[in-house]
Amino acid sequence: MPELPEIEVLRRSLEPHLPGDRIVRVEVRNRELREPVAVRALVRLAGRAILSLRRRAKYLLIDLEGGRTLVVHLGMSGRLTLAPGALPPEPHEHVALHLASGRKLRLRDPRRFGLVLALPTAGLERDPHFARLGAEPLDPDFGGSTLARAAAGRRGPVKSFLMDAGVVVGVGNIYASETLFRAGVHPLRSVGRISAARWDRLAAAAVAVLRQAIAEGGTTLNDFADGQGRSGEFQVSLAAYGRQGEPCPRCGHLIRRLVQAGRSTFYCPHCQR
């Protein structure tokens, strides 16, 4: 599933092209997504200019004039790409925004776990999709104390804690494994047994992993591509994830795999304590 780095890459790839353009027509070809597309709400976006692009967690936010925001979540297999308006629809294309520039912004989603909504911009943070989201790891005030406060009085493995979007957003399975590897923290360690210094290392590692992933175009393990159709390259830089049986790049011990909550975790038994 595309996580925070992939959506930030998508935002940055579209930002030079969309603001200032105008939606002239909205085409809904298939309304069956995780939540059925509200056709009337989308169609009413026609005529509105695109003001800016933002991101909250794994949601892309396209702010429009008139106080509306188009919210897009890619789910597991979604792609949002900018294409010439004359191109025929892609297979599994659900929604296309036809723009005054002659281009179209199209969402395709073969597995239909994605989401597209038209919501009021004011009070967006109170919408049920956003109200319970945790800290943004790329915000300037994010740090070890953010994680420590969220962990107070809790138990359970730290990897599951990092993947809890109510604690911190966008640290999915791959990025949690890489964060724990960089910080030298065992994925099964209880959050009740993590010192302030370890929380600082974890926060710094999470930020570093996410920033590197963004710089390298995201991780293309589930057919992710940016708004121009380009694939990411961060999977080449993965130090632990997917490397079971390979030597640890720090100490040479073999990387191991375990399953937590149905998800694969990769770690070094020597470096991570």
Image (cartoon, helix red, strand yellow):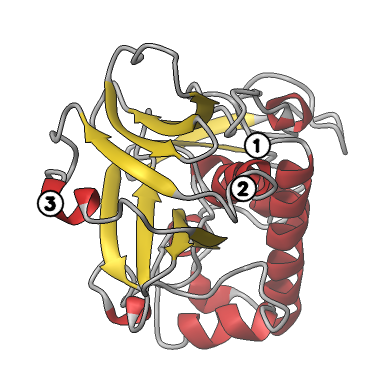
Residue drawn where x is 28% and y is 40% of the image: 26
Q: Position of residue 87 (x, y in %)?
A: 44, 13
In this rendered view, identify the residue nearer to me: 185 or 235: 235
The residue under label 3 is which amino acid type?
A: Arg
Q: Position of residue 188 (x, y in %)?
A: 51, 54
Q: Secondary structure at mark 2?
A: helix
Q: Secondary structure at mark 3?
A: helix
Taking the image as shown, residue 116 lies to the left or right of residue 151, namely left
The residue under label 1 is which amino acid type?
A: Gly
- Nearer the observer, disc 3 or disc 1? 3
The CA span between labels 1 and 2 is: 6 Å
- Report the disc number at residue 218: 1
One can see residue 198 in this view: yes
- Tell whether label 2 touches label 1 (CB within 8 Å): yes
In this rendered view, identify the residue nearer to me: 17 or 221: 17
The quarter holding residue 248 reads top right
- Nearer the observer, disc 2 or disc 3? 3
Residue drawn where x is 47% and y is 87% of the image: 152
Marks 2 and 3, the one that precedes in the sequence: 2
In this rendered view, identify the residue nearer to me: 68 or 213: 68
The residue under label 2 is which amino acid type?
A: Pro
Marks 3 and 1, the one that precedes in the sequence: 3
- Report the disc number at residue 5: 2
Marks 1 and 2, the one that precedes in the sequence: 2
Taking the image as shown, residue 225 lies to the left or right of residue 25, namely right
Report crowding for label 3: few under 14, some 14 to 19, many 20 or more residues within 10 A (C-alpha): few
